[in-house]
Image (cartoon, rainbow, N blue to C red):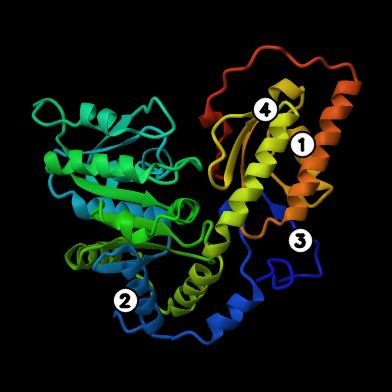
Amino acid sequence: MSPLSTCLNTEKPFVYDFTSDTATIPTDEMFDIMKAASRGDDVYQTDEDCKALEDYVAELMGHEAALFCVSGTLSNQLGLRCLLFQPPHSVLCDSRSHVFNYECGGISYHSQANVVPVVARGTYMTAQEVESRINKDYLCGAPTKVISLENTLSGTIMPIEEIRKIHDVARANNVFMHMDGARLWNASQETKTPLIEYGKYFDTISICLSKGAGAPIGSILTGTKELITRARHIRKMMGAGWRQAGMLATAARHCINTVVPTMPETHTLARKLGTSLQSLGVQILLPVETNMIFIDTSRTGLTIADFAEALKLKNIKIFSNPSTTTRLVLHYQITEKAVGDFIQVATELVQAKHKSGFIPPTHVVDVSVESAYPTATVQT
């Protein structure tokens, strides 16, 4: 499927959006498929395409049931809420995780749970680090009831072997396991690990459909029939039950089958871009293992805004800010030509800076990855 020929508004220049993999544009083909979708009521569970999508993803994950949700934040919060029953209780997770940093304090609000963030020494949290932070019997702390892992996390992959070890630690301590698998498709495709293998080690898994998978809207929560029945009820309580969602479900199913298999190609382009930027003096803050590149341009003497303005002339969009750090995210609508144009623009910028007399510093600047994350603010 060509991301260019089938996008709407083709009379306008196509913008290659590197800000996020949520930036993919629904194609004409998706809209045609949506027109033929079932039109039942998902609150009453009478929509055939919603049910088919849920059954399909549950089977992929090796779980009994699934629930189609509007967002990954919702499916994460439902998954955690269904595993947490009565305070005092706590959720243990990586300090960089989405459920801790980017879901508006949802765990404390919806589940009345304490969150215990673990600062990983490497690119992922280890079983040893997890075990050292589990609260078994400390009276003044909230007992650990859920371990929440994220895969991928900042584009890096948690090895299945480490997941297995953490699962064993959890079971030995009667602790549930939840996965924020917003980009689990990427980890699965890159490592050739079937989703069902991940499913063995988690009570609930949230997997996004609108990020790398490219669907217009949606996320799926999987688990046992009992857990999903409970999640469906809580979803309704939150006002998040939806009616004629079949059109979104059928578009999501289409994307799972056509876009997800192309992810290894996207990962290859990401590594190519990362390697090229590094050769120009741009610092790569994390290993480029899937579709994300975290960069610091301080050694080039250029800001992110400098890059953004120049890239805009090639119809390439990145988050613009006056600092030297940002995140680049690739997806199936980023072409090889777009990556080539990005490299060309970056090369010309750096060369022009050198010609102006700029001398790159010899020391490596210590920059936190967190500073490269985009920020969203309330518009007033």
Q: Quadrant of residue 283?
A: top right
Quadrant of the image for the N terminus? bottom right
Label 2: which residue? Answer: 43
Q: Residue at x 18, y 49 (%)?
A: 84
Q: Position of residue 98 (x, y in %)?
A: 41, 43
Secondary structure at badge 2 equals loop
Q: Amino acid at mark 2?
A: Val
Q: Position of residue 344 (x, y in %)?
A: 82, 41
Label 1: which residue? Answer: 307
Q: Amino acid at mark 3?
A: Phe
Secondary structure at badge 3 equals loop
Q: Position of residue 119 (x, y in %)?
A: 36, 27
Above or below, 184 against 67 in this view is above
Secondary structure at badge 4 equals loop
> Is residue 202 rendered to the left or right of residue 22?
left
Q: Earlier in the sequence, mark 3 or mark 1?
A: 3
Q: Nearer the viewer, mark 2 or mark 1?
A: 1
Label 3: which residue? Answer: 14
Label 4: which residue? Answer: 324
Q: Residue at x 50, y 65 (%)?
A: 217
Q: Quadrant of residue 6?
A: bottom right
Above or below, 72 against 359 in this view is below
Secondary structure at badge 1 equals helix
Q: Earlier in the sequence, mark 2 or mark 4?
A: 2
Q: Residues within 10 Å of mark 2 (few under 14, many from 20)?
A: some
Q: Amino acid at mark 4?
A: Thr
In space, the residues marked 2 and 1 are separated at their CA atoms by 47 Å
In space, the residues marked 4 and 3 are separated at their CA atoms by 26 Å
Q: Earlier in the sequence, mark 4 or mark 1?
A: 1
